[in-house]
Image (cartoon, rainbow, N blue to C red):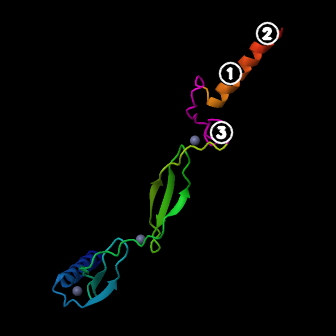
């Protein structure tokens, strides 16, 4: 019987504390300011030192935005693949990427094939002789004709 009574009393005690806590608190707010970041506004957090009740008030100024540095080459473009460049925020490390246009095929050794990827360049029409080749052929024919005369 005594035990039941003590449980009943402690429940009553807790309940009355609950009612007291729920009753009007004189709220003594303490403010802490959180400065703006790249992506969020600055704000002040107000916390009641007595009951823990809290709320936030936000700055009217927008977030700072990222402070991106110069573009850095992440991978160089080739004649078959786009390159990639990268920009990093010096404050929070966030980064964005963009593409670099492909470069042209190159043929330094004049074999009508791209030195990097083997792409075939259009070759000049072989049916058409250059004036030099045409003359060479003409002389060769004349020489052959002369030879045939004395054969
Ligand atoms: Zn309070
Ligand atoms: Zn940032
Ligand atoms: Zn190529």
Residue at 47% x, 51% y is 101
Mark 2 and mark 1: span between their CA atoms?
A: 17 Å
**Within 8 Å: ligand 3 and the Cβ of disc 3?**
no
Which residues lie in the magenta part? Answer: 109-128
Residue at 65% x, 39% y is 110
Residue closer to the observer: 133 or 103 = 133
**Earlier sequence position, callout 3 versus callout 1:** 3
The answer to whether residue 75 is above or below residue 17 is above
**Mark 1 Cα shell of 10 Å, populated few (<14), some (14-19), many (≥20):** few
Residue 125 has which mark? none
From the viewer's perspective, tell me whether residue 133 is left or right of residue 1.
right
Please provide percent x and percent y for residue 41. Answer: 30, 76
Please provide percent x and percent y for residue 28. Answer: 24, 91
Report whether residue 49 is seen: no
Q: Single out the mark in the foreground, 2 or 1.
A: 2
Q: Which residue is mark 2?
A: 149
Q: Quadrant of the C terminus?
A: top right
Residue 110 has which mark? 3
From the viewer's perspective, tell me whether residue 7 is left or right of residue 119.
left
Residue at 46% x, 53% y is 99
**Mark 2 Cα shell of 10 Å, populated few (<14), some (14-19), many (≥20):** few
Give yes or no for contact between labels 3 and 1 (Cβ–Cβ under 8 Å): no
Residue 138 has which mark? 1
Report whether residue 135 is seen: yes
**Earlier sequence position, callout 2 versus callout 3:** 3
Look at the numbered disc 2 and give the secondary structure of its residue. helix
Q: Is residue 116 magenta?
A: yes
Residue closer to the observer: 149 or 103 = 149
Residue closer to the observer: 25 or 84 = 84
């Amino acid at each position: 019987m005594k035990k039941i009574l003590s449980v009943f009393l402690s429940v009553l005690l807790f309940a009355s504390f609950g009612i007291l806590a729920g009753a009007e608190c004189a709220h003594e707010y303490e403010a802490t300011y959180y400065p703006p970041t790249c992506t969020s506004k600055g704000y002040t957090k107000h916390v009641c030192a007595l009951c823990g009740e809290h709320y936030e008030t936000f700055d009217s100024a927008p977030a700072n935005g990222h402070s991106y540095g110069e573009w850095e080459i992440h991978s160089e473009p080739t004649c078959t693949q786009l390159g990639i460049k990268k920009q990093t925020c010096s404050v929070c490390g966030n980064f964005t990427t963009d593409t670099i246009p492909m470069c042209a095929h190159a043929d330094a050794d004049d074999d009508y094939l791209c030195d990097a990827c083997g792409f075939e360049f259009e070759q000049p029409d072989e049916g058409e002789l250059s004036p030099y080749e045409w003359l060479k052929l003409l002389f060769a024919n004349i020489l052959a004709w002369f030879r045939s005369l004395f054969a």
